[in-house]
Amino acid sequence: MLPIPAEELNGSGTLGPYWTFYRAVVAEQLNRWLPRTPSTILDLSRGQGRWSAQAARAGHRVIEVVDFRKTLAADAGPVLRDADRVRRVRADDLRFLPDGSMDAVLAEDRAMSLELMAESAVGDIARVLRPGGRALVCVDSLVLGMAILAEQNYWAHLRQTGEVMLVPWPDGSITRCFSSTQLRELLVEAGLEVEWIRPRTVLSPSAVDHVLASDSRALNWLVRTELEAHPDDDDTVGIHLVASARRPEDS
């Protein structure tokens, strides 16, 4: 189990060096994953803006959905705002997008774990992707769920429906945790072809802290080591899983 408090596990705590490293891994992974030619990208990453901005700097047009699937006021429709290459949209679903209209979809920052009905959400992602379009999806892992339960001694509060693992956080929110097999099934059942699934990071906070304390210039080396070292489909380590999937060309 991870020897760090639950409030640190979602990136909101004080493990500064580790989360600096983590964000650098995400940024480099996204840089490698983004289309090589200018594309239209949908960002469902909880309205944080960081990954939309990175995609825009790489020359892509981005639609960033804010409050994805949250209830809006009865008289509120989608609210649009342009900022250079990024258009922010407040909407509770993706009905405003035509079928096959997106070249790529980002669901970073644990977006599909916070969406408890992830099957419906991933189905929407598959619908709006053009044939050959790709999705990058990040979820909480079973390792994270078990660590939170162990720390809080909340075993009795574990809710399961079939093989779905729902875990309460100290702040009262619920996260849906996945094994690599469950994440693969989620994507495949939506009609997507899985390219790869892997833990976001396998290096521990203590290892990262030790290396960066010894040489603050080692960050880039750590990121390269992380992205090139660990095997696909290993869900025995790491607090988050990340997957790349593609809509088949003939769909």
Image: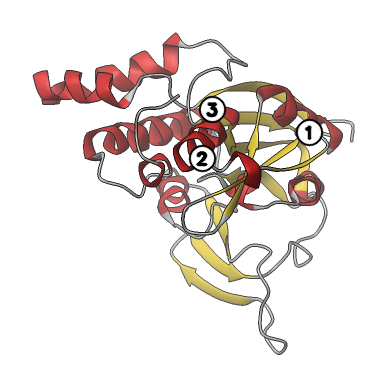
Residue wearing tag 2: 153
Query: Comparing marks 2 and 1, which lies closer to the viewer?
Result: 2
The residue at which mark 3 appears reads as 143
Q: Residues within 10 Å of mark 1 (few under 14, many from 20)?
A: few
Mark sitting on residue 44:
none
Query: Which quadrant, please, contains the N terminus?
Result: top left
Horizontally, is 242 left or right of 202 in the view? right
Q: Which mark is residue 163?
A: 1
Q: Residues within 10 Å of mark 2 (few under 14, many from 20)?
A: few
* Whole-number angstrom distance, CA of label 1 to CA of label 3: 15 Å
Hey, which residue is sitting farthest bottom in the picture?
A: 75
What amino acid type is highlighted by mark number 3? Answer: Val
Q: Which residue is at a point 26% across and 18% down the rendered structure image? A: 207
Q: Nearer the viewer, mark 2 or mark 3?
A: 2
219 shown above or below 229: below
Label 2 sits on a secondary structure element that is: loop
Residue drawn at x 23%, y 40% as measured from the top left: 16
Above or below: residue 73 compared with residue 102:
below
Element type at mark 1: loop
CA gap, disc 2 and disc 1: 21 Å
| Residue type at tag 1 | Glu
Residue type marked 2 = Asn
Which of the 4 image quadrants contains residue 156?
A: top right
Around disc 3, counting alpha carbons within 10 Å, would you say few (fewer than 14), some (14 to 19), or many (20 or more)?
A: many
| Image coordinates for residue 126, horizontal then vertical, percent | 78, 43
Q: Earlier in the sequence, mark 2 or mark 3?
A: 3
Where residue 133 sits, quadrant-wise, is: top right
- State the scheme by which the image is colored: secondary structure
| The C terminus lies in quadrant | top right
